[in-house]
Image (tube, rainbow, N blue to C red):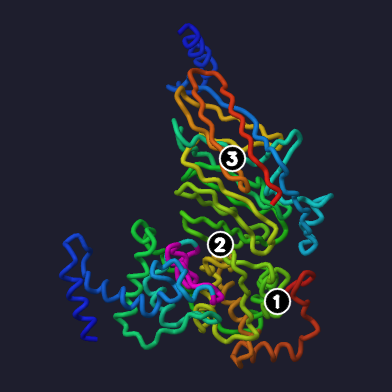
Amino acid sequence: MMRAIGAVVLGAIALAPSAPRTKILAGSVSGTVTFTGTPPKMKPIDMAKEPSCAKQHATPVETETVVAGPNDALGFVVVYVSAGDMGTAATQTVKFDQHGCQYLPHIQAMHTGQPLEITNSDQTSHNIHPLPSKNPEWNKSQPPGAPPIETKYDNAEFIPVKCNVHPWMHGYFAVLNTGHFAVTANDGSYTITGLPPGKYTLTAWQEKFGTQTADITITGSETAKANFVFKATPY
Amino acid sequence: MRLVYIGLLVSAVAASSTTQAQPSILGGTREDFRRYCAGCHGNAGDGQGENADYIDPKPRDFTLATFKCRSTPSGSLPTDDDLYNTVRRGLVNSNMPAWRPLADVQVHQLVEYIKTFSPRWKTEKPGTPISIPPEPAVTTDDILAGRALFQKMECWKCHGPEGRGNGPSASTLTDSKDQPIKPFNFAASSRFKCGSTNEDLYKIFMTGLDGTPMPSFADNFKGDDAWHLVHFLRTLQQEERPEKVVWQQYLSTHQGQLKPIGPDGGGQ
């Protein structure tokens, strides 16, 4: 009890300049995502057909279907709350850029309805072609210097994104029914903050290896641990 | 025919009050759908009819409510007229014929029936049809502007520098169901995917062909841009058309002055 009051006082001090918040007591969860087995080898991308992109990469970039880091770490895994407090819809715009004929980031996670801004930093035309199954499918050309495409998705799903002009370009929109999510860094690490006390089911999704789940309980302002291990297959 | 009516009567009597209005019409339309459409599109409208395996491009999956030929912006539902016109016109370079023998009322009812396969029709309204400005006169400058757009928008990457459907990305193209798909060859066809008039071609740029690699250019075309492109594309076709006459006259005196279209091209 003392500790909880302490946290409240501390929180109140830290938040003093901004508007008072009701939800001060919140925990976090963090961990790493790794794999066992042999992941598929990523292929170098030949951008010779698009010289304006090829010259942006000193060494050829590789496909990003399975991004394996040191110590068997897995990057670009989406970790999110699939049961428990879902948080509130984020209102800040998330960004997805076409840069050097790659998608930056490879996977963009967002809440349903969250504003999404798609830009083209390249000197070539791209067509942005997301392939949803639960949301309307559209396909728009975005030439160099074109204004950003501003959109949103109302239904949760993992949406593959491709460019028909540059067939090597592949990405994902992870549209989630929760505001509690993170995407792992190249070292496999992730942190989700702002979890009010309660029981949670976390789901980790990797585009090639599917999903894993873990249950955690948050009691106060602690950081819970949840690691995920995917079984990698080379094909 | 009499048998069908008896069937309708029976199903109308059998239908309880929970059925939507005009159950007899839908009942008869189901018969029409099974007779004329289901062989390719499947009884469930999922594009998995018994002929589907042998057809390229694949029959439309109505459960996705994604349609190529629309007057509405990319990603939105088509209007009833759009669907009606597709059934009547057929789809060039595919197995979808023009359903001319069907009565108007049959086609209208089939359109309603097609809309029962996706829940999107219950929650969304069709998009607002794009507005098409009056077509400007065909001039050399207008065709040159269209040619510059063909270069700038990189249409040639799929459709090829001469519009023959053989651009550098052509062989890699797939539709939204991962089936290989060919870009339109302007030199080999007089009809476009969604009609044969200049206005039909204008609509294709501004709405895109949803479910295929052809994107919408609506956000990036201003003023008469799309008309310029329509007029230029007409010069790539075999048909003798007014656009072609103007263009050939120009080429007879300016042939050497044009930069080729392609990776090093400037369009003009």
Magenta stretch: give its range. B54-74
- Where is mark 3, residue-wise? A78
In the displayed structure, B163 sits above or below A224; it is below
Residue B232 visible here: no
Looking at the rendered structure, the kind of residue marked 3 is Val
The residue located at (33%, 78%) in the rendering is: B32
Q: Residue B16 appears at what percent x and percent y?
A: 17, 63
Magenta stretch encompasses residue B71 = yes
Q: Residue B188 appears at what percent x and percent y?
A: 63, 86
* Quadrant holding the C terminus of chain B: bottom right
Are the residues flagged by discs 1 and 3 from a single subunit? no
The mark found on residue B190 in the picture is none
Chain to which the residue tagged by mark 1 belongs: B
Closest to the camera, between mark 2 and mark 1, is 1
- Where is mark 1, residue-wise? B166
Closest to the camera, between mark 1 and mark 3, is 3
- Where is mark 2, residue-wise? A139
